[in-house]
Amino acid sequence: PIIFNEIMYNPNPGDDAYYEYIELYNRAPVSIDLANWQFVAGSNAHALSADTIHDGSSTILASGGYALLVDKATSTSTVYDGYYSAPNYSSSALRIKISGASLGLINTGAVLVLKNDSGTIVDQVNYLNSWGAANNGKSLERINYNNIYSQNQLAWAESVVGGTPNAANSALDVSAGTPVADNVAISQNIIWPKAGSPYLLYSNAGAYPTLNAGVKLIIEPGATLKPQNKYYYALYIRGTLKAEGNANEPIS
């Protein structure tokens, strides 16, 4: 329900310690409390809490809202303003503090993980500077927040305007669907919702997205699957596939 939505990993001009940011987005239909969640960058884990420096008093993120992660060392309320203007604090535009002194956004790339208060991974991305936004002061933006696979470059685009902290992404396209790369291995039970359609299945020299043994994939009624190359597509099933289409909402 909570996803990485924007990554400012190499601001220019600007000191990384003050201008780096991570934006989260709540795509769930309900508000979610981020208290005691963890943001992990590489081997460094950081607890999340309200950012009182930026007038934040809550960690409850409204449905459809954004949360901007800032580091512990941040000491001014205008750190983003004048660089990329961030909306005023609200339940739909939270500012959240991490427990560490730095977000740890390495310019060449890093593994970022978001965990809930139970320690369960809710989103993960291993961004690389080859994806875009390298040395030009722009951010990486998630193209479609309904895309459940953030792990490959197909899900991200360089910001058109530079950066959009706590606001809708400039590269946003909810009709873009969900690219499922040929190297995707589905390793935990998951649902492919209708909202993520079309699911664009990639294949490459006999490599296909794979549903691992012991794992269940549920495809919601009305979901659409398409070949990325317009000719053929495949999903290699080693686990359990449950297609829930019906006469009114078939899976196509």
Image: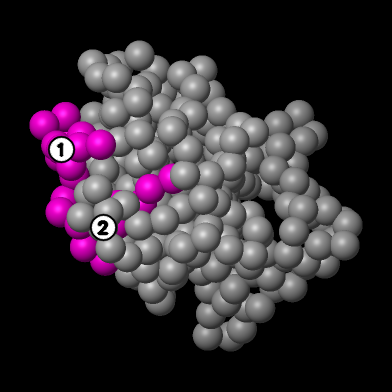
Tell me the quarter of the picture where residue 80 sits: top left
Indicate left or right for 209 with 70 as reference: right
Residue 186, can we see it?
Answer: yes
| Residue furthest left as drawn | 82
In the rendered image, which quarter contains the C terminus? Answer: bottom right
The residue depicted at 47 percent of the width and 44 percent of the height is: 99
| Residue under label 1 | 78
The residue depicted at 70 percent of the width and 43 percent of the height is: 184
Q: CA distance from mark 1 to mark 2?
A: 13 Å
Amino acid at pointer 2: Gly
Toward the viewer: 136 or 243? 136
| Span of residues in magenta | 75-98
Q: Earlier in the sequence, mark 1 or mark 2?
A: 2
Amino acid at pointer 1: Thr
Q: Which mark is residue 56?
A: 2
Q: Is 86 part of what is drawn in magenta? A: yes
Toward the viewer: 44 or 29? 44
